[in-house]
Image: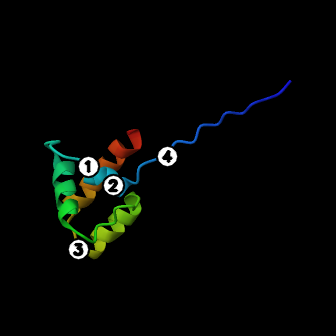
């Protein structure tokens, strides 16, 4: 008997790119995404930790980090 292991590989969209696509949500993730779209140095291919590190270097306030936390939960469920 031949065992065919058909493992599916799913490609996960990078967090940074997912965030850039968020529009018209009406929440603070929307505001974070709008800010990211205007920043040419935003880490588009970054994971949530890379985005947090970048925002830390930009001296972002606590609300931004709370928005990243919420966005990470949405992205992980995506």
Residue 66: quarter of image: bottom left
Q: Secondary structure beneath disc 3?
A: loop
Q: Nearer the viewer, residue 3 or 64?
A: 3
Q: Residues within 10 Å of mark 1 (few under 14, many from 20)?
A: few
State the residue at coordinates (72%, 33%): 5
Give the mark nearest the N terminus, 3 or 4: 4
Q: Residues within 10 Å of mark 4 (few under 14, many from 20)?
A: few
Residue linked to disc 2: 17
Residue linked to disc 4: 11
Give the mark nearest the N terminus, 2 or 3: 2
Q: Secondary structure beneath disc 4?
A: loop
Where in the figure is residue 73, as x and y percent of width and height? 35, 45
Specify the farthest residue to the top.
1
Q: Is residue 74 above or below residue 16?
A: above
Where in the figure is residue 14, as x and y percent of width and height? 40, 54
Q: Is residue 40 above or below residue 12?
A: below
Residue 64: quarter of image: bottom left
Give the mark nearest the N terminus, 3 or 1: 1
State the residue at coordinates (28%, 67%): 42
Give the mark nearest the N terminus, 4 or 1: 4
Measured in 3D between alpha carbons, the distance from the residue under mark 3 to the one under mark 1, in whole angstroms, is: 23 Å
Where in the figure is residue 8, as x and y percent of width and height? 59, 37
Measured in 3D between alpha carbons, the distance from the residue under mark 2 to the one under mark 3, in whole angstroms, is: 21 Å
Asked whether, in this view, residue 13 is left or right of residue 69, the answer is: right
- Labelled pair 4, 2 in contact (Cβ < 8 Å): no
Q: Quadrant of the C terminus?
A: top left
Q: Residues within 10 Å of mark 3 (few under 14, many from 20)?
A: few
Q: Nearer the viewer, mark 2 or mark 3?
A: 2
Residue linked to disc 3: 59
């Amino acid at each position: 008997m031949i065992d065919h292991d058909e493992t599916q590989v799913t490609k996960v969209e990078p967090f940074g790119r997912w965030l850039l696509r968020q529009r018209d949500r009406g929440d603070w993730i929307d505001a974070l995404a709008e800010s990211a779209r205007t920043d040419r140095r935003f880490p588009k291919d970054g994971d949530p930790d890379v985005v947090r590190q970048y925002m830390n270097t930009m001296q972002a306030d606590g609300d931004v980090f709370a928005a990243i936390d919420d966005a990470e939960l949405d992205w992980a469920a995506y």
